[in-house]
Amino acid sequence: MVTIKDIAVRAGVSFSTVSKALRDSPLVKPQTKAHVLAIAREMGYQPNYAARSLVSKKTGAIGVVWPSIESFALSSLLTAIHEELTRTGYSMLLSLDRAKDAIETFRRFRTDAVLLFGDEVPDGTDPAWQDRKMPLLVFGVAGVAPYAVVDVNRGQAIRLALRHLAELGHKRIAYFGEVKKPDPLQAVKIEAFHEEAHRLELAVDANSVVQVDNISFPDGYWAARSFLKQYSAPTAIISGSSELTRGLLRAAIELGIRVPHDLSLISYDNYPQMASMEVPVTTVGVALHEMASSVVQALLALIRTPDTPITVELEPELVIRESTAPPRATT
């Protein structure tokens, strides 16, 4: 195994200089740092987290419990978080195990903190979760667990979408994304949809919220094909996720429904990829880089002061693109 001492000998610098360069310390001149990092890559150096922790009591690693490798949206966010962590000198360890098993693994690796996603969030009542020596940060579902949380004001995102469509003149608007199994994230959006529709005096009935099996591209596609064939289809749809939006847009195009001429479409999830769809999609949500930066800053704050309560709620924005327009006039 290649060690820091091996790199120091090869680079002709001290052990301390190599250590600082690998941690991206500002105390090392950029030219020297680039020289050391190039040699480390050439020699195939891998950091020894256990040895690092013995010296500094920190491993420089963050554990991430990942619920799915299939989600386009979550994968984009994971990539952005990884880039942010790398810039701060931290490494990321990824686990696809169930949360409890993953956290136990991260304890053995002595990671400095753990980031949780998805609906497998500990509620704090299980004794297995009482060990607070390892800081835990949850992305989403603010207020559900007694842990530090970075969340998005999902309800406000849906309100922004409805107001935009109402201002364009739409009266028949549907929400696309009620999942058959309990999903607190979608439940918040649906509640906001009903409240804001009532405030705007929009007609809402049993067909105004469209059910899907899951938040995925295939589920969005098949649910949309069935729903859009209805004679009383709405003039505008708010989609509950970027995955559903991709399926919905594909189904609409195959059915000859023109977006936005026949149907306006807004997607939750403000991801860059929404701008490069077959029709650039209007979105509501928080920009990818802002979410990633907020998550990383919260993790770093937890590592510095583990007992400090952290709750960050990010405010969404409306990004208008070509998928929304006034409803087509009917005679």
Image: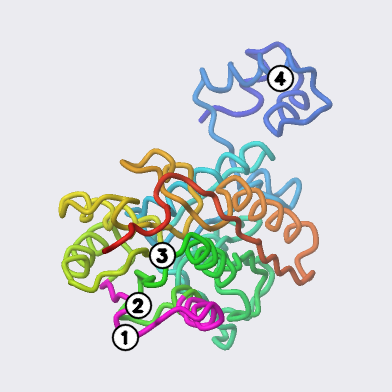
- Type of residue at label 3? Ile
Q: Which of marks 2 and 4 is in front?
A: 2
Residue, far right: 27
Measure the alpha-carbon separation of dots 2 and 4.
Answer: 56 Å
In this figure, which residue is indicated by the disc labeled 1? 206
From this view, report whether residue 24 is shown above or below residue 222: above
Q: Separation of disc 2 and disc 1 at Cα?
A: 7 Å
Marks 4 and 3, how far apart in space?
Answer: 49 Å
Residue at 75 percent across and 46 percent down: it is 55
Q: What element carries label 4?
A: helix
> In front: mark 4 or mark 3?
3
- The part of the chain drawn in magenta is 190-213
Residue 238 numbered mark, or none? 3
Which comes before the other along the chain, label 2 or label 3? 2
Quick one: 270 or 55, which is closer to the camera? 270
> Which mark is first along the chain, 4 or 2?
4
Q: In this view, does 130 lie above or below 64?
A: below
- C-alpha gap between disc 1 and disc 4: 62 Å
Labels 1 and 3 touching (C-beta < 8 A):
no
Residue at the extreme front: 331
Magenta-drawn stretch contains 81: no
Q: What residue type is labelled 2?
A: Val
Q: Which mark is residue 209?
A: 2
Name the secondary structure under disc 3: strand
Q: Are marks 2 and 1 in contact (CB under 8 Å)?
A: yes
